Amino acid sequence: MAERRYDALIDARGLTCPLPLVKARQALMVLDTGSTVCVLATDPAAPRDFEDFSLATGHGLLETREDAGVFVIVVEKR
């Protein structure tokens, strides 16, 4: 299987709400449309925060999954 590549990787493990979302938003601000940001977060509120964020902003929520206690969230700038 091919390795996935992202335009930005945000390691927000150990950070609480709203810091994972704030860091992702900062990255999205400087990236071009179509770019992807992968966020690694341990805050249990992160998946819901990113769902709400994508609905409010129109950015695409491409993936949300949990892997060994870490949420992997992928957002596409639109």
Image (cartoon, helix red, strand yellow):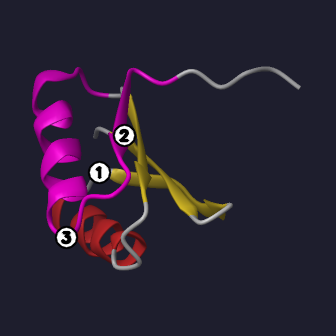
Of all residues shown, which one is farthest toward the right? 1
* Residue wearing tag 3: 17
Whether tag 3 and tag 2 are in contact, CB under 8 A, the answer is: no
Residue name at image x 35 percent, y 69 percent: 46
Locate residue 17, reporting x and y percent. Answer: 19, 70
Is 62 covered by the magenta stretch? Answer: no
* Residue wearing tag 1: 59
Earlier residue among tags 3 and 2: 2
Between the C-alphas of marks 3 and 2, the distance is 14 Å
* Image mark for residue 10: none
Where's the N terminus, which quadrant? Answer: top right
Between the C-alphas of marks 2 and 1, the distance is 19 Å
Q: Which residues are magenta?
A: 6-33
Disc 2 secondary structure class: strand
Relative side of 7 to 63, left or right? left
Where's the C terminus, which quadrant? Answer: top left
Disc 3 secondary structure class: loop
Earlier residue among tags 3 and 1: 3
- At label 1, which amino acid type do we have? His
Whether tag 3 and tag 1 are in contact, CB under 8 A, the answer is: no
Between the C-alphas of marks 3 and 1, the distance is 19 Å
- Quadrant of the rendered image containing residue 33: top left
* Image mark for residue 11: 2
Locate residue 36, reporting x and y percent. Answer: 40, 32
Q: How many marks?
A: 3
Locate residue 62, reporting x and y percent. Answer: 52, 51
Locate residue 77, reporting x and y percent. Answer: 29, 38
Residue name at image x 25 percent, y 59 percent: 15
- At label 2, which amino acid type do we have? Asp
